[in-house]
Structure formats: structure tokens, C-alpha cells
Image (tube, rainbow, N blue to C red):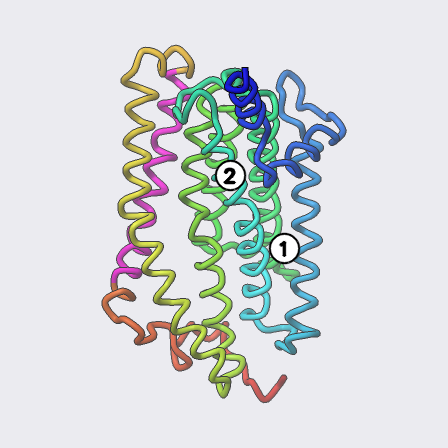
Amino acid sequence: MGSDSAQKAASAGADRPPSILNLWISTYRNCPNLYIPGTHLNLAYILASAAVLLLSRQLSDWIFINLFQWPATAKMTMESAACAVSGLQAALFVPSLGACLLTTKPSYRPSGKMTDSQPWWQDAAKALIHFCTGYMLYDSIMLCVDTWDAATGRPNLSSADLMFIGHHFATTFYMTTALLQGAGHQSAMILMFLGEMTSPLMNAHAVLKFAVKIHPDSTLVYNALVYSEYIFAVVYLPMRAVGGPLAAAHLTYDLLLTKEGRQNCSVLITLLWMPMCWGVLFGSIPWIEESWEMLQDGLTLKYGPDYDYGDEYIHHHTDL
């Protein structure tokens, strides 16, 4: 009898969400319903997520200019404020996404159905996917705002900016179509998890490589940049060169080459997903090569105080 009670208690504990997911579940369940017609996509949660991130960006701009005393009109300040928001949201998002992947029932499977998991898990997964969609919307908006050209009345988007917007569109398409068909969402989540895992380190490095320009006499900033660059390379290289391809190969096999995968997920949609999935991995090859170079350099900086980012990044620290 005591054994039965212990088993029931263990079962009840297993059916409860990890505490890190409670906020996501609560906000999703209490968010007003504003569904896109014919879908289960809650536009209200997506827009609320984007709004929170837009407010965070405004706060980040204020902090860099007023507290850190960075030059208000410098491109380095604008990009660093944006990186701070991106890194912070990833630091909050990735652990929750990891907890969700670890607790999926019966176990992780890229083609698994949403209804196979507990109701609380479904709400947590939907909240995370909706939030990520809101981030893609926020980042696309800010790319246009930050590059707005008053003379022409339109954003002056570079080829890199257009690539990022294309990436955001593809990611949003992948996530939302998975939700619409009620399966394949775990394949989107594992790609999000592996892709965002290095974001806090990448964005910290991006801020510090500009900070060393703004504060060239700071030993603390210089040392922080040295170690952040090396640690980023140590983490990014295996994640992108090994982890990403292995996860992509596994989900490709499960979605296309297993009977259950083809039953749960539309083969047409899966075929549309494949170029997006593999395209991002192939597109990261230049960063993989760069991280390998950083790793070989050890604690010798690639992006040191004298690195030339181009004329648009030039500023004089005496203007602070």
C-alpha cells in the first residue's frame, strides 16, 4: 500500500510542469483570444510578446545612452542596445524551451502530435512558439526602424538585413504551420533551442566588441571581451557544426522516412520545411569558420580595439 502511494505521488509529480514553465502556461491561458481566422494562432499573444520586446528595446536604448553614457547617435550604440535585448530574451527563452523538450510525452519525436502531450505541456509549447513568433515580428520591425531613411521615406536595408528578415519569415512559417497541423512542432522547437542556445554569448560578444571601442582604456571591458570571444567560439562551434546537423538529420529522417512521420505531418509541408532547416545550417558556415579561427587563436582577440568595422561605425570617444 505504501508502495502504491509512493507511485501515485511520483506520477502526480511527473504530471506537474517544471516551475520554469509556469509563467508561460499562465500567460498563455490568461491571454485574450484573438485567433487568426481558421487557425489556432493567437494573434494577441504574438502581438503582446512583440510589444514587450519593443518596450524592452526602448529601455535598452535609454540605458546605453543615459546610464552607460554611450554616444546617442552612434551605430555601435544602436546595435549594442538591440543585441542586449536579443541576448536577454534568449537567456530567458532557451532554458524554458529546454525544459519543455525534456518533459514532452511520451518522449521527444520531431513528428509527434501536440495532443500526445499533457494539456499543460501543450500550453507551454504554444506559448513559447507564439513568443518566438512575436520576437521575429519585433526584430523585423526594428530592422526597418533602425535603417529608416527619412530622405527616401523607406528603410535602407542591407543585404544582411534582408537575409535576417527572410530568416525570420521562414522561421515563422515553420513554427506556425507546425501548430496549424498539430504535429511537427517538436522539430521546430529543437531547431529553435539549438539555434538560440548560443545567442546570449553571441550577443554579449557583440556588445563587448563595441564597448572596447567606446571605452578603449577600460581593462575590465578588454578582458571581458577576450574571454567572451573564446567562450563563444568553444560553445558555438560544436553546436552549429555538430549538434545542428545531427538534429536536422534526425528530424529529416523522422518526418520523411518513417510511416508515422508521414502520417502526422503533411509531406508537402515537410518538403517546404527542409530548405529552411538545412538552409540556415549551410548559411552558418561562415560563422563556423570564424569560430574555428577564434578557437585556434586562443585568447588572442579577433575583434580587438583596433578592428576596422567601416566608416559608418567610426566615432570619437572624446564626444561622450
Work out whether residue 142 or residue 193 is closer to the camera in this orientation and state it.
Answer: 193
Q: Secondary structure at mark 1?
A: helix
209 over 13 or under it: above or below? below
Q: Which amino acid type is shown beneath numbered disc 1? A: Val
Magenta highlight: main SS: helix
Determine the residue located farthest toward the front in the rendered image. Answer: 1
Q: Is residue 82 left or right of residue 284?
A: right
User: Which picture quadrant has residue 31?
Assistant: top right
- The residue pinned by badge 2 equals 97
Residue stretch rendered in magenta on the structure: 267-292
Q: Secondary structure at mark 2?
A: helix
Residue at screen point 38% across, 67% down: 229
Q: CA distance from mark 1 to mark 2?
A: 29 Å
Q: Magenta stretch: residue 284 in it?
A: yes
Q: Position of residue 103 (x, y in %)?
A: 48, 30
Q: Is residue 220 left or right of residue 260?
A: right
